Amino acid sequence: MSLLRVCAFAKRLSRRSLFDKCAARASLADRCQLRVPTRDGAVRRISETHLQLQRRNVSFVIPKRDDAKKRGLEQSQLLDVLEARIQQLRSDIVLDVRHAKVKFLKAPSLGRGVLSEAAAVGQEQLSQQVSRWTSSSNPLLLLQEDVEAAACGDIQLSIRSYLEACVFAGDVERAQRFLLSQHRVMSRRKHLNTGVYNIMMRVWAKKGTLNQIGRIFSLLEEASLKPNLGSYCTALECMGRNPNCSPNVITRCLSQMKEYGLSVDDLFSRCVFRQDERDMVLKAVHVVQPDYRPRLKAEATPWSSSLVHDFYTQRSDHQYPKLDFTQEELQERFNLQLSMEQACTATINSVEAAKPVTEHMARMRELLADQRAKWQKILLQALRESKMILSNTNSKDYRLNLYPYLCVLGDKEYVDIMIQSVANLPPSGESLKILARELGNRVYTKYSVRQKHQSQMVEKLRNIYNSYTDLLAKDTKEYSVLPSEHWCKLELDQTSGPSLQGGETHWPYIVSLELGTYMVELMVKNLKINSDTLNSAFERKSIPILYHMYTFRSTRQVGFIKPHPILTQMQQDAMETELTFDSFVIPMLCPPVPWTSVKFGAYLLTPTKLMRTVEGATQHEVLLEKCQNLLPVLDSLNQLGNCAWRVNKPLLDIIISIFNDRGCDKLDIPPPLSEAPKIPHFTAHDPAYTASEKAHMKREVINAKKKCNEMHSLRMDALYKLSIANHMRDEIFWFPHNMDFRGRTYPCPPYFNHLGSDVTRAVLLFAEGKPLGPKGLDWLKIHLVNLTGLKKRSSLEGRLEYANAIMEDVLDSADDPLDGKKWWTNADEPWQALACCMEIANAVRSPDPTRFISHFPVHQDGSCNGLQHYAALGRDVIGATSVNLLPCDEPQDVYSGVAQQVEEFRARDAQSGMKIAQVLEGYISRKVVKQTVMTVVYGVTRFGGRLQIEKRLKEIDEFPKEHVWDASHYLVRMVFSGLKEMFTGTREIQDWLTESARLISKSGHTVQWVTPLGLPIIQPYHRTRNQVLKSTMQHINLQISHDARERPDTVKQKNAFPPNFIHSLDSTHMMLTALHCYSAGLTFVSVHDCFWTHALTVDTMNKVCREQFVALHSQPILQELSNYLLQKYCTGFP
């Protein structure tokens, strides 16, 4: 029998064993069923809400023999593919490889193939980085653990959040009853872990009731669970609070800890403390060990990557930048930011406030204020009545309900959140699911801030932050440590009192959604207005101000909450002068708290995730918490967040003036709704119209409504951005950063940031100014030419020469932007171009331009960055030349190169008589093909590429519209063919990544990898399952595509792997550049592959950027990836 056949047989036995265990567990559950999930993702309707998940049926996958055979074959194929790549990489010579062919070996038939010796050799050469991530050599064991953990994870999260809400609200009796009801029934007890029991132990520890602590320890023993550090911590805290506690009891507790391999030092280094818990634990320990002092020290992190080893170990030449603030000024800013976050909201003036207030506007504002006062009273009464009903509901103790979540804030706070949501509701309405989610999240944010106040950590945060400013302020000594290192040291120095990382449980997505739905239902039922409010001729009756209705999104029916036209008219006529935002929407008024762990960083109190994920997805967080070497990633985020900003006030005033004067579509300033097309009115039953005329008029009505909705959305988006910018016009501010699951970084404030549109980027300046120096003015001029979109293929000298030739237009644009020649309006990025014109004008008119202090950010953009990484990975010299990885006399423009090649194909086909090729003569340009070329490396399909080209062709007024379809089909084929010829290695690497991902997902796994900086990445694409959230208003159908219990979505996994892998490399390069720019004292921020710095330091930044790109691609990236995939997914083979 061949090795492969033996391996497949062993895997079948393992799967059978897994199923037997699942079946045994299922027999203990009174309401569990075994069923095979259907391929079409049928709706799993649940009789209870997600808050009653402990009663939900649990589905287990029953593997069939055929599936086992298929998996064996697929793993064999994956092994062959990866081994082929290893052999190829071993034989490659870096400089000579131009077209790296990836050979796919034909998979041997099951039962006859023999694994090659190369496979065994490949598995023996696994990197240390991989071994840290794979804790078990048996992938089936890992799969079983993952499935079981996922099956209980959501339920445990719901239970923990419910108990914590009960305890926070002071309803200890309800929490205790619930825990006991879960414990008594075996089918529900399996969802409990030690952490759940610790929640109640913490309560009894505060009360000093040691007998209750002992009872819960007995419950742990009954549940076959072992006490953990948290359990012993609460026991010792209780002993410390109890003056009559015998020293023998404390000694026994410490002895038992020692038996389990836990030390007293572990308590103080790994446990999370609130209020005075730490002092009480130490008091108990001192009873039996009077001389004990906690020995705490920062753990030395082993550098997983040679890329950052020198950065952290050789600091003699590092020059970490300081902020242009005194320590006292930074401390004052901390207090301002703390006050805003404690309020959880910020109210600012709208930029529309400058309009004169008419008598009608004043009357509408007064009317709205009166109505809101009435609505507050009505909602307050309705909320209290509904809470009373919920609290007295005669339900079984094991059933969860919303009552505790409605008690974590004051009643008025819930009402304020609801009233604010009414004010922010757009005229077209909002999806019930989105509105409910926002309401639930606002409640959770306030609750989280209140928890931190209750734990008494705010004062400790203030003390540590005040000391932390010593690192950043300009009037303090120089340090040779990074912000995260300094913060960690300050925490170690101030160990008394509560922990800054409180360890609170984040509410499950379904809890926030159900709570929000409940609040929406209260609003719809109780908020009403008189029908004659705006027109006294109407009959007076009380009508709802919100309507629940249904609309279609594509083929899906979606529940909508829509305001009554009376409310919409009142709000539009009132033109209120204030806008209220969540506090995290506003940029920070002080430098962000440095990221020091997965759960701590960014804002002072507002909960923030390190990694942005789909609502409800937890697999990313689990991976991050297991990772021990994230410091380079965290430090790069801290560097980006520490950049201080200010507003370009002269430019902002120009933009606001256009915004308040009917806008301008050409300049991306949305016009007001008064400029929207009028919606035609007609009677559908009017016999004067024919059927075709009625159909035509219906389409016109639909199009007009769609246009109005789009204009309102764009107008409000611009209003928010400009209002926030205007609010911050005299401030210095910061953007805290986090990242997505691929490692790409983003500012946390969602509206106003440097990743925004041309308008928002144009009004942002660095807070710190630096002199232009000898080459700074030249870089400003080159940057201006880059913003125009002209001279793409000209050298830097050619662009500078062109800039000098148009100086008259530049100065005219700066002096008279709205009434002059308006040269700047024809640029690709007009507002940034105008800002650059103003900066150049100020510099050239200064006494000495080299000493002119410039705050202007100069950009250096990548040349089709995805293709650059592919060309470097494949050592593709031809491809590298076209994307400027090799020295050239003039910059290469890959988009123009592809357009030129496509034009050659077109001319050849036109000569042979092809009609569509003849029609396209003169219409093939860089702009037509650019988007498709840019996105091909990120996984765009021919279908998507055709749509992109079709859009570009429609923008050409002269192009015959009847040929758009055929022309887009033809051009997308030519673009793909041209890229295939230019980037042979790119396509072959893409194919290898795609095929590997296909085989991995077919074998039942999601694709994972680790970036060269040690960031773990997992693709959260699973087969979609439907879950129904039931409420009296509407059953909300949730399409969940991230559930780890479902099999991977093979199509998404394989299509997403190449672009996501390249994105992860792109982010790694940016992070390396950020770290080394920081050590060189540069101001540096990025918009993905576009890097920003002062004009003075552009050359230094360029040098760092190139050095880090070379350093990154000097690593054996593809071989390390191949080794990792072999280790993780093929370890079952001998």
Image (cartoon, rainbow, N blue to C red):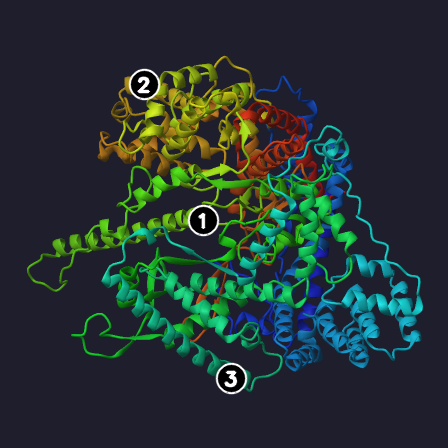
Q: Which residue is mark 3?
A: 388
Q: How many marks?
A: 3
Left or right of 853? Residue 942 is left
Say what amino acid the circle numbered 2 marks: Ala
Say what amino acid the circle numbered 3 marks: Met
Left or right of 682? Residue 141 is right
Left or right of 709? Residue 1099 is right
Taking the view exactly as shown, the residue that stands out farthest to the top is 889
Comes first in the chain, label 1 or label 2: 1
> Where in the figure is residue 279, as x and y percent of width and height?
80, 66
Q: Which residue is mark 1?
A: 751
Comes first in the chain, label 3 or label 2: 3
Q: Which residue is mark 2?
A: 907
Q: Are marks 3 and 1 in contact (CB under 8 Å)?
A: no
Using the image as rendered, state which of residue 657 and residue 314 is in the foreground: 657
Using the image as rendered, state which of residue 364 and residue 997 is in the foreground: 364
> Where in the figure is residue 78, as x and y percent of width and height?
64, 40
- Mark 1 surroundings within 10 Å by alpha-carbon count, few (fewer than 14), some (14 through 19), many (20 or more): many
Say what amino acid the circle numbered 1 marks: Tyr
Instruction: Give the SS element for disc 2.
Output: helix
Instruction: Give the SS element for disc 1.
Output: loop
